[in-house]
Amino acid sequence: MEAQTKICQNCKVLFTIEPEDFNFYEKIKVPPPTFCPECRLTRRLTWRNEGILYKQKCGFCKKGIITNNSPFNKFSIYCHDCWYGDGWDAFKYGKNYDFSKDFFTQWKELMDITPNINLWGLNNINSEYANYTGYSKNIYLSNAVNCEDIYYSRLVDKSKNLVDCYYVSNSEFCYENFITRKVYNCSFLNNCSDCIDSFFLFDCRNCQNCFMCSSLRNKCFYIRNKKYSREDYLKELERFKLNSFKYLEKYKIEFESLIKNNIHKFANIVNSVNVSGDNIINSKNLKDCFMVEGENTKYSWRVFNGIKDSYDISGGLKNELVYESSLAADDGYFTKFFSHCKGNKNSDLIHLCVNCSNIFGCVSLKNKQYCILNKQYTKEEYEELVPKIIKHMNDMPYVDHIGRSYGYGEFFPSELSPFAYNETTAQEYFPLTKEEALKQGYKWKEREERNYNIDIKNEDIPDSINDVDESIINKVIECRNNPDALRGRSPDQNASGCTEAFKIIPQELQFYQRMNLPLPRLCPNCRHYQRLKQRNPLKLWHRQCMCDKDNHNHKGKCTVEFETSYAPERPEIVYCEQCYNQEIY
Ligand SMILES: [Zn+2]
Ligand SMILES: [Zn+2]
Ligand SMILES: [Zn+2]
Ligand SMILES: [Zn+2]
Ligand SMILES: [Zn+2]
């Protein structure tokens, strides 16, 4: 089959389906997509709410729980133990397929009555506020896999003792690190690996005791890219007063301009062949992938542990031959259009299902086979009925309220998601205003009235950690973006999900004291939103290397071209791998 250009049903932009894509779609038995890759990604992300949490009661055992589902949803929420337990039967909600109605309307009716799990977690200890977390201990307002003692952090793997980090792996004692690996006792690192005892580093590798440096390799005792003796370095560091918030604010501004003025490599790709995207490691044959470790995979985000032969996965671990998922935990195989699932085989259009095979259109099933809309069939009945439903889905597609049509081959429509657009990961990567979101057919969550009794005004938070003692714990501290603190200026507040006030928990205070760092001024959601501003979009542009150095092995301007997440209009200088490597120290 030849490459084909199509018009996206959603944004009306042209997109290309390559011959190898047709082979993939044929292999997994789905029709080619009608949404472009970016609109498909956004649609999947509207089904992921990582961090907007609510207090509710378990619909089964009635104990208090934390959940990412707002009380507006009709289904009941079960705590982890009740949802996984045998005390209830998801077949109770099952329905016969009704050929007089479209599939997605029937599926939504099933979702609205079937109990959901409060948060997505597996095998965690002491982590009731952790979402998207597995095999971990002491995780608080974070998502993490194989971790311990992680606070206010996202996308963390195999790490311990982190506060306010984003996309960090194999690290310990880190604060405000952003896209880093194998780092110990460091704060404010951006795009670094294998560093120890350092502060404010951008793209450094294997460095120790460095402060405010960029593009260093294998260095020790450097300040602002200048070598110091051990004694002088330690003396200077003392003078920097990193335990003072006022001083830190100045260094943050300095660091921001250091990053902006530094040269940038077109992408962060480690130990990989034939890949396009950003933050890719140990991979081969990837296209348009971000934060991925795998092979023969396209259009995916945040997948690791070796995904294989898959397209369109947003969040996941080891899977094979899977397509269009908003969370694919381990061991899925030949499964398509699924949200928050683990270990399912040969299944389609399922939500919150675990270790099932041959199920179609089901919600909250565990260890089942041959089911449609939560109803049990024999193998023969199942194999006869599924093709009829697929045909019916195309004869009578679901049409959403702004006219987009969903036959077989589409992920779940955003308007059926339990979440409003600004509760989801979609808002983090593709931010919209309320007006834009409503116009594009999404739901929107209005700001909640909170009216906290503030114990400590923002300007009264002590400047140095030395002036803080245990009495700070459980005090209600005003967020700097609180409308009162801002006196009417509040541009970021709705977008960031600002909670207006925050508390310091005991483990967190211990961490700041050990690391000698001041207390934060923003609530956790605002801090997360600040960090997100540092990252590039999940988008690629075809560009040419900007290097024109005459000491490189090119005459005049370098002609190397690449796919990069740096848009052409951005101020940063972007180099190809070879030119960049000639400029590091
Ligand atoms: Zn589109
Ligand atoms: Zn319960
Ligand atoms: Zn806030
Ligand atoms: Zn170049
Ligand atoms: Zn060059």
Image (cartoon, grey):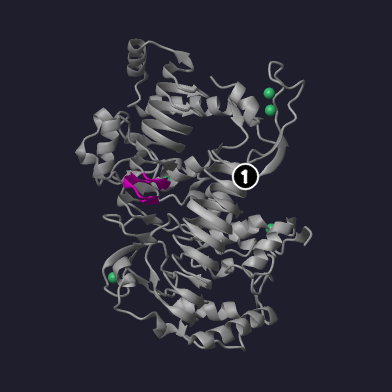
The stretch in magenta equals 141-158
513 to the left or right of 232? left
Q: Depth check: give the residue in front, 118 or 496.
A: 118
Q: Is residue 182 above or below residue 408?
A: above
| Residue visible at 63% across and 35% down in the picture | 266
Quadrant for ligand 2?
bottom left
282 to the left or right of 130? right
Name the quadrant containing residue 400: bottom right
Q: Depth check: give the residue in front, 507 or 341.
A: 341
Q: Is residue 390 above or below residue 25?
A: below
| Residue visible at 25% across and 43% down in the picture | 507
Q: Secondary structure at mark 1?
A: strand
Q: Depth check: give the residue in front, 353 or 18.
A: 18
Q: Where does label 1 land, which residue?
A: 275
Residue 549 image position (x, y, % from top left): 70, 19
Which quadrant of the figure contains the N terminus?
bottom right
Residue 133 image position (x, y, % from top left): 38, 55
| Residue visible at 46% across and 66% down in the picture | 341
